[in-house]
Image: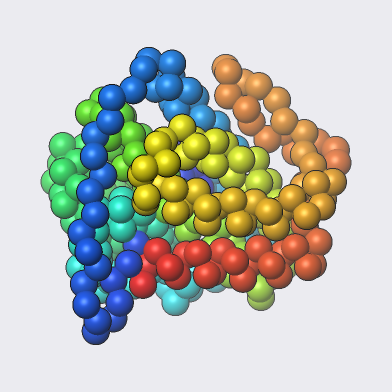
Amino acid sequence: MRTSILTCGLAALFLLASCGGDQPKQDTLNNETKVDSTQAARVRKTKNIFHNIPSPMETAALLKKAGAEYSKDILNDVKNVDNYTAASKQALNLGIYGADLSYASVFNNTQESMLFTACAQNLAKRLDVSNAFGQETVDRMEENRNDRDSLLNIISETYWNVDAYLKENGRDNVSALMIAGGWVEGLYIATQVCKNHDTPELRQRIAEQNLALGELIELLATYSTDDAAVTGVRADLEAISALYSADPAAVASTVKQENGVTVIGGGSPAATVTDEQLKLITAKTNDVRNGYIN
């Protein structure tokens, strides 16, 4: 599976409570009854989102080539996990911690990888998806913590299993929020790294996220407007998309179909973003992401 720290582990590989304030009102993410055609469309769009972003190894190579080093300061603090009492925040941050987990794993930071694993497992349990992310999975991660490739494969497999479990149980909206959280965190990490290590290759990866973003917005659009959590996240993503769309030619990229999935082909012209676009995308992504984790 092609996921990212631009959903790093992607999408695997891939959270709102105020510090010291009142706890947010608990929301509910109810199961929904949907027709098969809608379910099939959601599965297809989910695959496209995951395949339209670089693999963890590709992203790691780009970051290292840019001279970037591991920085835990740009990741969500593991201490925040207990603040997420609303189901929508738990779903978003299951994705966010998944992206952080993959990022830490790519840079062989095994100690923090295990901390992010604990956060993800905590949220999975509270969302009642521990069947897909239980102790057996955590044990496998622990056993392979010094084998980066195996660990990333386990992370990717786990998040696919969570996604499948949620869909099978009529909880697609929880899965959609998880995917959105992971995507936002991946873009956030990339744009933060780009501040100090700006390279054409990293800019291209950031620009190419517009393709996955379009699929993600379309995925969220399949849900009822009565679902306030999904509608709010969709509005956030549309605001980011508008910044990409300011100059459509700047984010052009060759794409192709592989087994029914749209995949970025690199090609000509290469995707890119202008200095002004990058500045605006970085700022907006930071605002959106901070709204999810604080």
Q: Residue at x 59, y 51 (%)?
A: 238
Q: Nearer the viewer, residue 143 or 225?
A: 225
Where residue 132 appears, x then y in whole percent?
A: 21, 37
Q: Residue at x 34, y 62 (%)?
A: 15
Q: Nearer the viewer, residue 177 or 225?
A: 225
Where residue 48 appears, x then y in whole percent?
A: 55, 31
Q: Residue at x 64, y 51 (%)?
A: 241
Q: Is residue 203 left or right of residue 160?
A: right
Q: Is residue 279 left or right of residue 189?
A: right
Residue 270 seen? no
Q: Residue furthest front?
A: 226
Quadrant assignment for the C terminus: bottom left
Q: Nearer the viewer, residue 42 or 115?
A: 42
Q: Nearer the viewer, residue 11 or 72?
A: 11
Residue 267 seen? yes
Where residue 202 appears, x then y in whole percent?
A: 69, 57
In this rendering, the answer to whether 261 lies above or below 52 is above
Residue 21 position by quadrant: bottom left
Q: Residue at x 51, y 30 (%)?
A: 45
Q: Is residue 69 left or right of residue 18?
A: right
Where residue 141 appears, x then y in whole percent?
A: 26, 48
